[in-house]
Amino acid sequence: MSEARFILLGPGQARPGRVPMPPAFAVKAATDDTEGRLSLLEVVLARDIPRHTHHAADECVYVLEGELEVEFDDRTFTAAPGTFVLLPKGVPHALRRASDPPPRVLQISSPGGWECYLEDLFEAGPSVLTDGELDPVKINPIAARHDIHYEETTRPQ
């Protein structure tokens, strides 16, 4: 084991970042911690995540509490606690709250970089929102720097 890369975080602890994250996003392993291989966050899904595609990273989600609605390609699933979801790069997907309180999940991005995108998003502040919701048109310039693209048209539900 490399002592220089060993991390031990207690309950409620998170890795520091370039930009402070809201409490709903706790970085457990940053991209720099894993030599770029992955990033791992504990996330409370307070807002629905619009349909988007990761072009460079696979996304893994493990549901800890609550229920998460997962739209993958053109199918929709409900993920209960203990459910694992692999969202391969290149396939459109969306994540939505399916419970109250909202779901709490572990989110892994491989290769890493997810926390870097979130830092850029939070640094932009409310400018990425329209009527309190994430706005794909406003998010895409930031997302493009991380090989992510949000669909800008509304899909029927």
Image (cartoon, rainbow, N blue to C red):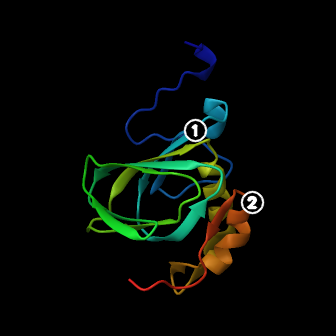
Three-letter code for the amino acid on which mark 1 is drawn:
Leu
Q: Is residue 99 above or below residue 31?
A: below
Question: Which quarter of the figure is the N terminus placed in?
Answer: top right
Q: Residues within 10 Å of mark 1 (few under 14, many from 20)?
A: many
Question: Which quarter of the figure is the C terminus placed in?
Answer: bottom left
Q: In terms of image quadrants, where is residue 33?
A: top right
Q: Earlier in the sequence, mark 2 or mark 1?
A: 1
Label annotation for residue 26: none
* Gap in angstroms between the C-alphas marked 2 and 1: 17 Å
The residue lying toward the viewer, choosing from 110 and 131, is 110
Three-letter code for the amino acid on which mark 2 is drawn:
Arg
Query: 57 left or right of 147?
Result: left
Q: In terms of image quadrants, where is residue 136?
A: bottom right
Q: Is residue 149 visible?
A: yes
The percent position of residue 94, horizontal first and vertical second, equals 46, 67
Label annotation for residue 38: 1
Label annotation for residue 145: 2
Q: Residues within 10 Å of mark 2 (few under 14, many from 20)?
A: few
Q: Is residue 26 above or below residue 128?
A: above
Residue located at (57% from left, 53% from top): 89
The residue lying toward the viewer, choosing from 47 and 8, is 47
Query: 147 left or right of 105?
Result: right
- Per the image, label 2 sits on a secondary structure element best described as loop
- Per the image, label 1 sits on a secondary structure element best described as loop
The percent position of residue 143, horizontal first and vertical second, equals 67, 64
